[in-house]
Amino acid sequence: MRSLARTQAQSPADQKLVERVRREFSDMRGLSPTLAQARRLFHLADEECLEIFAQLLQEGFLHLCADDRYRLERRHS
């Protein structure tokens, strides 16, 4: 699966799903999945997952690390 190269999503993400993912990262502070792991964890389709994570990256809520893992941005921890 391709990583998000910090680009904007092609279409707007479903905001209920965005909020669900945001809550999970807030509740589980050490969560650091790859995109493929996040897809399975949140039961999301490929494009849906890409859209959600692109939005959360753009907002500065998540950070994409060099190891292709998504982590909660420090200011949100």
Image (spheres, grey):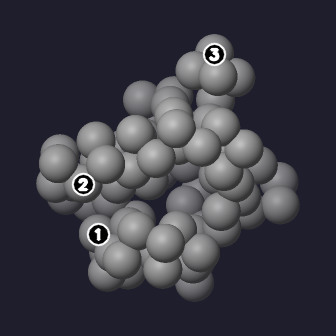
**How many neighbours does mark 2 have within 10 angstroms: few (below 14), some (14-19), or many (20 or more)?**
some
Q: Residue furthest right?
A: 67
Residue plotted at (49% across, 72% down)? 41
Please tell me how crowded label 1 is: few (under 14), some (14-19), or many (20+) other residues with Cα within 10 Å: some
Asked if 40 appears above or below 70 in the picture, the reply is below
Q: Which numbered disc covers residue 48?
A: 1
The percent coordinates of residue 43 (x first, y second) are 36, 77
For the residues carrying marks 1 and 3, which lies nearer the camera in this image? Answer: 3
The amino acid type, in three-letter code, at marker 2 is: Leu
Residue 74's disc number:
none
Q: Count neighbours of disc 3 (C-alpha within 10 A) and say few if under 14, some if 14 to 19, many if 20 or more.
A: few
Residue 1 shows up from this direction: yes
- Are dots 1 and 3 in contact, CB under 8 Å? no
Q: Secondary structure at mark 1?
A: helix
Residue 12 higher or lower than 29, as above or below: below
Residues at discs 1 and 2 in contact (Cβ within 8 Å): yes
Q: Is residue 58 left or right of residue 9?
A: right
Q: Is residue 68 above or below residue 26?
A: below
Checking the image for residue 75, the label placed there is: 3
- What amino acid is labelled 1 in the image? Glu
Mark 2 vs 3, N-terminal side:
2
Q: What element does badge 2 sit on?
A: helix
- In percent of width and height, residue 28 lies at 60, 43
Q: Which residue is mark 2?
A: 17
